[in-house]
Amino acid sequence: ITNYKKLKWDEFDFSALDSNSKESIDWAQVDLKKATKSNTFDMAAVDWTELNSSKSAAKSYKAIDWANVSISSDVSAQLDYSKVDFKKFSPSSLDNINDLNFATLGKNYKKLKWDEINYSTLNDASKEAIDWAQVDLKKATQSNTFDMATVDWAELNESKSAAKSYKAIDWAN
């Protein structure tokens, strides 16, 4: 591919790509905003290692409509979650919520849609990795699968934000 800008990525047939053609694409030059609109687009087609190390990684991540893509466990392991726009990201786009690397969320703790998480499917490793002091408990308690027993209360109680967290909880529900 020589002229990436002129290609109609939204009409591109990604299902026709074999491993060699996927390898030959310079993913840093692909318009992912348009590509994700293709009916045949698959997040697994992207060479995330190549994209993550490119200068245009942040721009590429920003172009993705995170609310309308499906993220397999394999793809999730390759994503740089610090570059994901969590205002657009929905936890339901993950095949498995435990694929989300809670330990690397950083500033995205505030933006994560805690009310959209299925807490009943969190495994022990995810519960341990979550920094409960940074969780928006007001939103979390709005999830119909939220269970107070999921929270690491000892961790939360030792944090500077404990009082704020307790106030955020709707104790009537």
Image: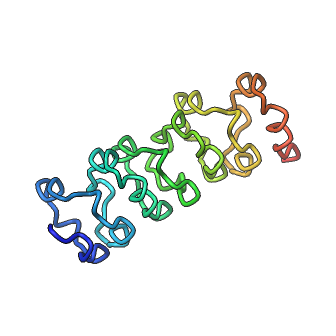
User: Horizontal and vertical percent for residue 33?
Assistant: 39, 68
- Count of numbered tags: 0
Where in the figure is residue 23, as x and y percent of width and height?
16, 53
Q: Nearer the viewer, residue 60 or 88?
A: 60
Quadrant of res 164: top right
Q: Residue at x 36, y 55 (%)?
A: 56
Q: Is residue 27 left or right of residue 24?
A: right
Residue plotted at (28% across, 69% down): 40
| Horizontal and vertical percent position of residue 61 | 42, 56
Residue 120 figure quarter? top right
Residue 92 coordinates in the image, percent (x, y): 52, 54
Q: Name the residue at 28% across, 73% down.
A: 9
Q: Residue furthest right?
A: 172
Name the quarter where the N terminus is drawn.
Answer: bottom left
Q: Is residue 1 left or right of residue 132?
A: left
Question: Residue furthest toward the left?
Answer: 20
Q: What colour scheme was applied to this rendering of the protein? A: rainbow
Q: Is residue 132 above or below residue 56?
A: above
Q: Residue furthest front?
A: 55
Left or right: 15 in relation to 152: left
